[in-house]
Image: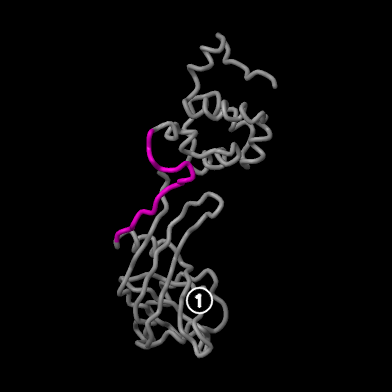
Amino acid sequence: MPATPYASGGGPDANRNHRSDVGRRVALRREQLGLSRTEVAKRAGIAPEYLRYLEEEAASPTLPSLTRVARALQTTVAGLSGVAASSSPEPPAHRGELEVLDTEECHRLLAGHSVGRLAVSTPEGPAIVPVTYTFTGGVIVFRTQPGATPSHGDGEEVAFEVDQLDEALTVGWSVQVAGPAHLIDEAEALGRLAEKANEPWARGDRNLWLRIDPVRVTGRRLRFG
């Protein structure tokens, strides 16, 4: 295959001076597989120009980008980063570990999103449904219609989850909340909630407001090793 062009003003040594360790490993692995930059870029879903930059310059790729390149090259992020050469007892298939989130971080993630999943018991059995919600004053509030699945949570212990996952990259986080749900009927409180409501899916006549008082809040985040 065609040789990689060198930087102007020198031969191979001059080119290596501008390359990062990651870039050298990417180029070496690609050549071992007999793949062109275009082929690898297509597999990784990135621009060929970016792959050229990664190989030839002292680039600092983001974790998602490097993960895509690693998978396209049938290797791991650790391998391209040089970690695989260590004497660590971890098997090569190891991709990361779960980090336990503290309550403050769980609350921050809850406050930063507006769609979650509610697990509730119904006359037909357990059900999990998506709901739009607002996290305010340390509680989760949402509204629904009389008789709708979420309304069965009134007076019951429910579970609630918010997450953000990327299965292709095997990264993400999840926050789970458990506690009693109660109907809100105070007029003043309802007025304040209507003003704060963050409801991108709001449709129909939903005049029942419920709150979940968190008793247990847990969270996990997948971090690469």
Q: Residue furthest right?
A: 1
Image quarter of residue 37: top right
Q: Where is residue 64 in the image (x, y as percent from the top left)?
A: 51, 44
Give the answer, above or below, for where 62 lies relative to 18: below
- 213, 44: nearer the viewer: 44
Q: Position of residue 113 (x, y in %)?
A: 44, 63
Q: How is the image coloured?
A: one colour
* Badge 1: residue crowd in 10 Å (few <14, some 14–19, many ≥20): some
Residue name at image x 29 percent, y 63 percent: 103
Give the answer, above or below, for where 38 lies relative to 113: above
Q: Give the range drawn in magenta.
A: 87-102
- Residue beneath label 1, please? 128
Quadrant showing the C terminus: top left
Give the answer, above or below, for where 186 lies relative to 134: below
The number of callouts visible is 1
Left or right side of 140 for 6: right
Quadrant showing the N terminus: top right
Image quarter of residue 219: bottom left
Q: Where is residue 104 in the image (x, y as percent from the top left)?
A: 29, 60
Residue name at image x 30 percent, y 59 percent: 102
Secondary structure mostly taken by the magenta-highlighted segment of the chain: loop
- 55, 194: nearer the viewer: 55
Q: Where is residue 212 in the image (x, y as percent from the top left)?
A: 37, 78
Residue name at image x 35 percent, y 70 percent: 136
Mark 1 element type: strand
